[in-house]
C-alpha cells in the first residue's frame, strides 16, 4: 500500500476533540462528520485536503477520547497516512482496527514540513520526502498487527480466523 | 520476574501462567461497555461483519449518558439505535433515561464491575474501574463490536509505573488534586501504553470515590489503565453490591516497574489544570486573579456522592457570585435521589446553582452548559482541550469539587478551604 501527497503539519498532543469535536457526535455518518475534521485548529484542512495527502504530527497524536470517529474522519477526508512521533494508545488501536494507515517515525515527524510532497510505502515503512530528497524508515508493526491490517481491519480478521 | 497487578489479571484472562510486558495476548472479557456515542458505530460494525448474537447478554453493558435526555433529533436517533440493539439482544445491563447514570459512576455503583475483572469499554474513561482492583481500559467502537461478538480482545501486555502513596491528604484536598498533580508531573503522555499502579500505605486513607477519580484520569496521562490493590475499603464497597465474586490480585514482590514514583499525600495542595492540556497544572492559590463565568460540578470524574457532599459543605447557606453560572450534575439517579433526600438540591438552588439530571453534557461540549467565546469555566471534569466545552476561544480549568465550589462563591479561581 502506497500513498503520495501534500503534508499537513500539526503539533504535539493533537487530541480527538479537535480532530472531531464532540458537538458533532450526534451522528455516526462518516461523510457528515468528515466535514468538520480538524476544524477547531485548522479551518482550512477540509477544503484543502486531497486524496492521498499526509498528516504529520508530533508526540501523542490522537490523545483524549476513545471516539473511533476520529481516525474515521481523517480516513474519510481522503488522508492517505498519518505520521507522528507517537500515537495515543486508543487512537493507535482504532486506526489499525478501521484501516487508517499510521506510522511512527520521530525523525520524519520532526523534519518534514507543511506543504512538502511525501510518499509513503506502508508495507515497508519507508517514508520519502520528494521535496527534500530525504528518506526515513518508520517503526515496523509487529506481525500480529500486520495481520489485522492485511485482513482489512479487526472484524475482517476475526471472520477469517 | 514477577508480575504487576495488571499483568496477573491479564494472564488469568488469557489462560496463561505468566505474561510479560510487550507480549501480545488474547484475553477473555468480563464486561464490554458502550455509550450512546460509541455504541451506534459498534452496532453498525457488528451488523456489517454479519454477527447475529452477543457472546453473553449479561456481560454487555450499554449506557445512554453522553447526550441524554436526548439533546436533539440526531441524538434521539442514536439513543433509539442503542435501545433497539439492546432489546434485540436482551442486553441485561442496558441503562436508559430514568435508570441511567454516567457510565463510570453507574457500573461500580450497580455492582456490574468487580475486582479481578478484565473490562473493555468504548469510552476512554473506562479505566475508572481499576479503583476496584480490575483491569479496565478504553477502546474504540470496532473493539467493542468484536468484544460483544466474541467475548475476547487482544492486548499488548503493558509495562507499569508504580506510584507509592504515603501519608494522608490534607482536609482541602481530594483524589482529584492527587491525579492532577501526577499528570502535571509526568505529562499527558507520561504513562503512554503503561499501567499506573497505585500502592503503599497511603492507599488506605483514600476513599473509594477518591480512588475512582484517580483511576478515571489515568487516560489523561496516556495510560492504558490505572489500578489500586483491594483492601478493606474496597471489600466494604463491593460487599452486597457486586453481582459476581470479586477476585483479588496483588503485585509480586519482584514485579517489574519502569519507574517508582513516591507521592506524599500530606504534601498535596488544591491543584488546577490550566488551558489547554491537563498537564498544565498550578496550585489553585496562584490563580486567584482568574475571573470565571461558569462552574461545572459533575462528570464521570467528580459527580459522585462525596463530590456532592463537598459541594454542599461549601455552598450551603452561601450565594453563588454574581455573573457566575453554577451547574451541578449528580452522576447517577441514586446519587440524585440522595441529594434530594439530604436536602442538597434545595441548598444548591438556594445558593443560586442549577441541578441537572445525570448526563456527560457539558464535559465534552455536548449541551447543558456550553461556553461562548472568551468565557472561562472551572470544572470538575477531566479535559480542558481547545473547544472541549464550547467555543474554541473558551477556557476550561480543571479542579476538585471543593475548589470549583469555592470558586463559584467568589467568581475567581479560589483555593478550597479545609473544613
Image (spheres, coloured by chain):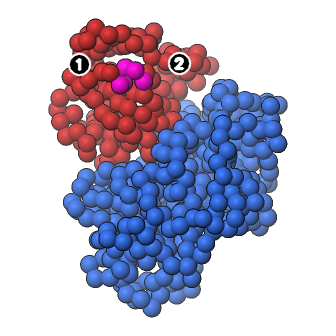
Q: Does the magenta stretch include residue A109?
A: yes
Foreground of the two, A54 or B150:
A54
Q: Which of marks 2 and 1 is nearer the N terminus?
A: 1
Q: Is mark 1 on a helix, strand or loop?
A: loop
Q: How many marks?
A: 2
Q: In this view, does B416 lie above or below B261?
A: below
Residue A65 placement (x, y as % from top left) = 44, 46
Q: What element carries label 2?
A: loop
Farthest residue, direction bottom: B317
At label 2, counting other C-alpha atoms closer than 10 Å, the crowd grade (few under 14, some 14-19, many 20 or more) is some
Residue at the image point whose x is 55% and y is 74% from the top: B172
Residue B81 visible in this rendered orientation of the protein: no
Q: Mark 2 points at which residue?
A: A141
Q: Is residue B160 magenta?
A: no
The quadrant the N terminus of chain B occupies is top right
Residue at the image point whose x is 24% and y is 25% from the top: A114
The quadrant the C terminus of chain B occupies is bottom right
Co-location on one chain, circles 2 and 1: yes
Q: Mark 1 points at which residue?
A: A116
Residue B138 left/right relative to A38: right
As drawn, the chain in blue is B
Residue at the image point whose x is 28% and y is 29% from the top: A9
As drawn, the chain in red is A
User: What is the span of residues highlighted in magenta in the rendered image?
Assistant: A106-110
Residue A41 visible in this rendered orientation of the protein: yes
Residue at the image point whose x is 57% and y is 67% from the top: B174
Residue A7 placement (x, y as % from top left) = 26, 23
At label 1, counting other C-alpha atoms closer than 10 Å, the crowd grade (few under 14, some 14-19, many 20 or more) is some
Amino acid at each position: 500500500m502506497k500513498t503520495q501527497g501534500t503534508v499537513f503539519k500539526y503539533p504535539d498532543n493533537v487530541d480527538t476533540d479537535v480532530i472531531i469535536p464532540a458537538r458533532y457526535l450526534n451522528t455516526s455518518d462518516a461523510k457528515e462528520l468528515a466535514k468538520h475534521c480538524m476544524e477547531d485548529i485548522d479551518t482550512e484542512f477540509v477544503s484543502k485536503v486531497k486524496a492521498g495527502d499526509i498528516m504529520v504530527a508530533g508526540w501523542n497524536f490522537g490523545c483524549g477520547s476513545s471516539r473511533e470517529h476520529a481516525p474515521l474522519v481523517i480516513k474519510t477526508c481522503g488522508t492517505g497516512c498519518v505520521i507522528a512521533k507517537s500515537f495515543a494508545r486508543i487512537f493507535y488501536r482504532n486506526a489499525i482496527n478501521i484501516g487508517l494507515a499510521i506510522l511512527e517515525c520521530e525523525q520524519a515527524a520532526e523534519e518534514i514540513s507543511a506543504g512538502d510532497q511525501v510518499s509513503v510505502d506502508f508495507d515497508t515503512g519507508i517514508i520519502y520526502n520528494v521535496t527534500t530528497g530525504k528518506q526515513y524508515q518508520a517503526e515496523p508493526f509487529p506481525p500480529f498487527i500486520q495481520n489485522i491490517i492485511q485482513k482489512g481491519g479487526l472484524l475482517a480478521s476475526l471472520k477469517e480466523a | 520476574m514477577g508480575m504487576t497487578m495488571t499483568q496477573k489479571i491479564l494472564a488469568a484472562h488469557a489462560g496463561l501462567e505468566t505474561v510479560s510486558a510487550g507480549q501480545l495476548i488474547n484475553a477473555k472479557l468480563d464486561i464490554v461497555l458502550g455509550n450512546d456515542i460509541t455504541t451506534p458505530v459498534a452496532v453498525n460494525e457488528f451488523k456489517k461483519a454479519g454477527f447475529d448474537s452477543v457472546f453473553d447478554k449479561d456481560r454487555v453493558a450499554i449506557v445512554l449518558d453522553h447526550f441524554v435526555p436526548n439533546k436533539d433529533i440526531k441524538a434521539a436517533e442514536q439513543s433509539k439505535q442503542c435501545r433497539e440493539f439492546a432489546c434485540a439482544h436482551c442486553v441485561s445491563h442496558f441503562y436508559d433515561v430514568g435508570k441511567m447514570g454516567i457510565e463510570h459512576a453507574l457500573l461500580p455503583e450497580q455492582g456490574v464491575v468487580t475486582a479481578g475483572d478484565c473490562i473493555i469499554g468504548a469510552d476512554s474513561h473506562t479505566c475508572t474501574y481499576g479503583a476496584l482492583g480490575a483491569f479496565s481500559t478504553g477502546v474504540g467502537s470496532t473493539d467493542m463490536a468484536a468484544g460483544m461478538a466474541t467475548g475476547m480482545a487482544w492486548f499488548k501486555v503493558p509495562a507499569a509505573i508504580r506510584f507509592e502513596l504515603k501519608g494522608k491528604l490534607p482536609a482541602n484536598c481530594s483524589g482529584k488534586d492527587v491525579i492532577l498533580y501526577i499528570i502535571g508531573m509526568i505529562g499527558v503522555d507520561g504513562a503512554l501504553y503503561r499501567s499506573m499502579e497505585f500502592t503503599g500505605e497511603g492507599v488506605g486513607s483514600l476513599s473509594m470515590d477518591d480512588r475512582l477519580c484517580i483511576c478515571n484520569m489515568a487516560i489523561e496521562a496516556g495510560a492504558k489503565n490505572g489500578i489500586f490493590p483491594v483492601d478493606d475499603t474496597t471489600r466494604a464497597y463491593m460487599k452486597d453490591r457486586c453481582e459476581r465474586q470479586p477476585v483479588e490480585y496483588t503485585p509480586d514482590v519482584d514485579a517489574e516497574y519502569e519507574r517508582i514514583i513516591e507521592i506524599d499525600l500530606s504534601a498535596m495542595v488544591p491543584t488546577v489544570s490550566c488551558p489547554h492540556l491537563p498537564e498544565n497544572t498550578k496550585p489553585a492559590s496562584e490563580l486567584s486573579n482568574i475571573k470565571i463565568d461558569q462552574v461545572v460540578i459533575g462528570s464521570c470524574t467528580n459527580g459522585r456522592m462525596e463530590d456532592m457532599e463537598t459541594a454542599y459543605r461549601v455552598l450551603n447557606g452561601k450565594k453563588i457570585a454574581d455573573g457566575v453560572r453554577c451547574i451541578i450534575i449528580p452522576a447517577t439517579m441514586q446519587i440524585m435521589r440522595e441529594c434530594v433526600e439530604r436536602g442538597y438540591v434545595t441548598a444548591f438552588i438556594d445558593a443560586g446553582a442549577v441541578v441537572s439530571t445525570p448526563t456527560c453534557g457539558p464535559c465534552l461540549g455536548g449541551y447543558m452548559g456550553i461556553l461562548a467565546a472568551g468565557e472561562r469555566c472551572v470544572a470538575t471534569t477531566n479535559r480542558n482541550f481547545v473547544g472541549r466545552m464550547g467555543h474554541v476561544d473558551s477556557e476550561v480549568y480543571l479542579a476538585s469539587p471543593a475548589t470549583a465550589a469555592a470558586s463559584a462563591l467568589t467568581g475567581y479561581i479560589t483555593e478550597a478551604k479545609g473544613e
